[in-house]
Amino acid sequence: MKKELHIFFTCLMFYTRIPCPKNIKHDPDYLNKATRYFPFIGWIVGSISFLAFYLFSLFLSTETAVILAIIASILTTGAFHEDGFADVCDGFGGGWTKEKILMIMKDSAIGAYGAIGLVLLFLLKFKLLSESISLFANENSYLLIFLLFVSVHALSRLAAISIIFTHEYSRDDASSKSKPIAKKHTWKEILGSFFFGLIPLFIFSYFQYKFLLALIPVFVMRYFLARYFQKWIDGYTGDCLGATQQVCEVVYYLSILLIWKFI
């Protein structure tokens, strides 16, 4: 149990800005094992984001509360995944070889592709999340809104982390901050990831069973993203995982909206 706590706090420390106990071991092997808790981090980030939305919605408009909820999630993670998304936009937008793409993604400066990509990403998040919340608000159910927040963050992280189970890490340099998570994984990491990634959606679908259909577009997008990364850089990087999480988050919102309206 003590070892599992160290593994969990290693995951929390790596993927968020939430303070952790100072006696946690910084073992690269723990970071590798921490992938089993990555979707569970989505539970935490989603809960914090929902709490921000709920509190601000008591005094402000829904649209303003949504923006502040998005800000809360970004502050919680330190824009970890958004940064990866921007790097992928720059790398794949400006590079035409594996070496050039990887070099651009490693550059800390943001380019035009990254800036444009982030603007469009946040616009989509704001619009889709606002519309989804408006639908559930008509049902007078904050529980559904809470489950929406938690399930999207958990499932999108599952879609991202599952790439490491099926593809190889692209970079050769051991200095990469994401290199430790690219090592061999056991059934515990795979089972833990899918358990924590799917449970919120299963609970969500208890109220509307058709929401389970959202799994299809999310993992179809995950498949094509992983295939695209494989084609151009022979695998994935940490930035690719961040970009996958962000794109699958938007796809999930869109799927829920379309399922609610048309199915």
Image (cartoon, rainbow, N blue to C red):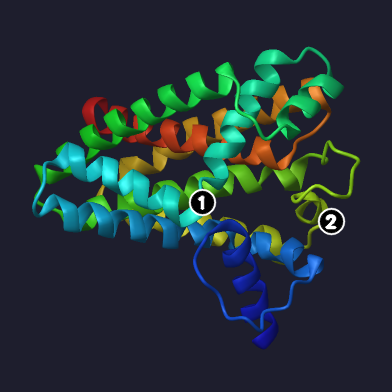
- Quadrant where the image shows the N terminus: bottom right
* 98 horizontally vs 213: left or right: right
Measured from the top left, where is residue 3 in percent x and y?
70, 82
Quadrant including the C terminus: top left
Labels 1 and 2: the sequence-earlier one = 1
Would you name the residue on which mark 1 appears?
78
- Above or below — where is 221 with respect to 44? above
Residue 205 in sight = no
Image-quadrant location for residue 193 = bottom right
- Tell me where residue 218 appears, x and y as whole percent: 50, 35
The residue drawn where x is 75% and y is 36% is: 236
Q: Residue 5 in the image: state x and y as whole percent.
A: 62, 80
Q: Nearer the viewer, residue 191 or 9?
A: 9
Vertical placement of residue 171 versus 27, above or below: above
Q: Residue 79, percent across and down?
A: 51, 45
Say which residue label 2 marks: 184
Amino acid under disc 2? Lys
Q: What residue type is labelled 1?
A: Gly
Q: Do the residues labelled 1 and 2 touch (CB within 8 Å)?
A: no
Is the residue 94 above or below the residue 167 in the image? above
Label 1: which secondary element: loop
Helix, strand or loop at label 2? It is: loop
Count how many numbered circles sit on residues in the image. Answer: 2
Q: Is residue 13 left or right of residue 155?
A: right
The residue at the point 79 percent across, 28 percent down is 102
Q: Which residue is drawn at 79% across and 58% down?
A: 185
Please tell me in which quadrant of the rendered image residue 25 appears.
bottom right
Q: Can residue 140 be seen in this view?
A: yes
